Amino acid sequence: MRILIVDDHPVVRQGLRRMLEAADDHLVCAEAGDAEGCLERLQAEAFDVAVLDVSLPGRSGVELLKQIHRQWPKLPVLILTMYPEEQYAVRVLKAGAAGFLNKRSVASELVAAVRKVATGGRYLSPAVAESLAAAMARPDKPAHERLSDREFQILRMIAAGSRVSDIATKLSLSVNTVSTYRVRVLRKLDLRHNGELMHYALQHGIAGHE
């Protein structure tokens, strides 16, 4: 089984690769550090599973996931990230992910998840299943669930204290583009400034570093 690991941290990629290949000698891994590298590998080689982080430089992992789902609809994508389940699980599963796993999970769970999605199944940890059930039970969606994936990413970064210029550098966007996203977020959440935005994020448990 061939697995493509997509993460912008070389140490993380190498750690995941060693973990998977040590657990099962039938698992062979390749690596990519960003969206463009991932697409190049997918165009050049055939893979059975892609393991993808949400936070990537330039294009976000969710945007990349959607493109993979369009171009390679039969390729299962397992999202492996540090983000809490309640923040991203529903969003990425709707975007086409075959499973969602937190990086705090043990090696055996990662191997089990890869095997399950490779055979056409879906992998949901108990925490993810609980998040999905809670989301379905809510009569009204909170305002931030109406944000686009990029807007949600900008919200999180501002709430974590990042400046517009820092966000622009990390995401390979212009300062004007990030400022435009910021304005959209404020408008959609009916907020006036960053202070209210940070308070909103804290209330809803969505503040965190990208």
Image (cartoon, helix red, strand yellow):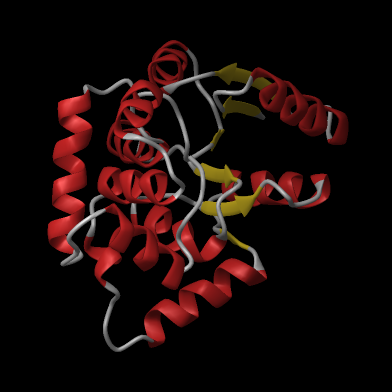
Q: Is residue 111 above or below residue 140?
A: above
Q: Nearer the viewer, residue 58 or 70?
A: 58
Q: Is residue 85 left or right of residue 186?
A: right
Q: Residue at x 55, y 44 (%)?
A: 78
Place of residue 131 in the rendered image (x, y in percent of width and height, measured from the top left) = 51, 73
Q: Quadrant of residue 170?
A: top left
The answer to whether any part of residue 26 appears in the image is: no
Q: Nearer the viewer, residue 48 or 86?
A: 86
Place of residue 53 in the rendered image (x, y in percent of width and height, measured from the top left) = 53, 37
Place of residue 44 in the rendered image (x, y in percent of width and height, measured from the top left) = 44, 10
Q: Residue at x 15, y 28 (%)?
A: 176
The answer to whether any part of residue 148 appears in the image is: yes
Q: Quadrant of residue 3?
A: top right
Q: Is residue 127 above or below residue 5?
A: below
Q: Residue at x 15, y 67 (%)?
A: 190
Q: Is residue 18 left or right of residue 53?
A: right
Say which quadrant the N terminus sits in: top right
Q: Is residue 51 above or below residue 9?
A: below
Q: Nearer the viewer, residue 115 or 12?
A: 12
Q: Residue at x 57, y 67 (%)?
A: 128
Q: Is residue 74 left or right of residue 107?
A: left
Q: Quadrant of residue 42?
A: top left
Seen as rendered, the residue at the extreme right is: 22
Place of residue 117 in the rendered image (x, y in percent of width and height, measured from the top left) = 58, 49
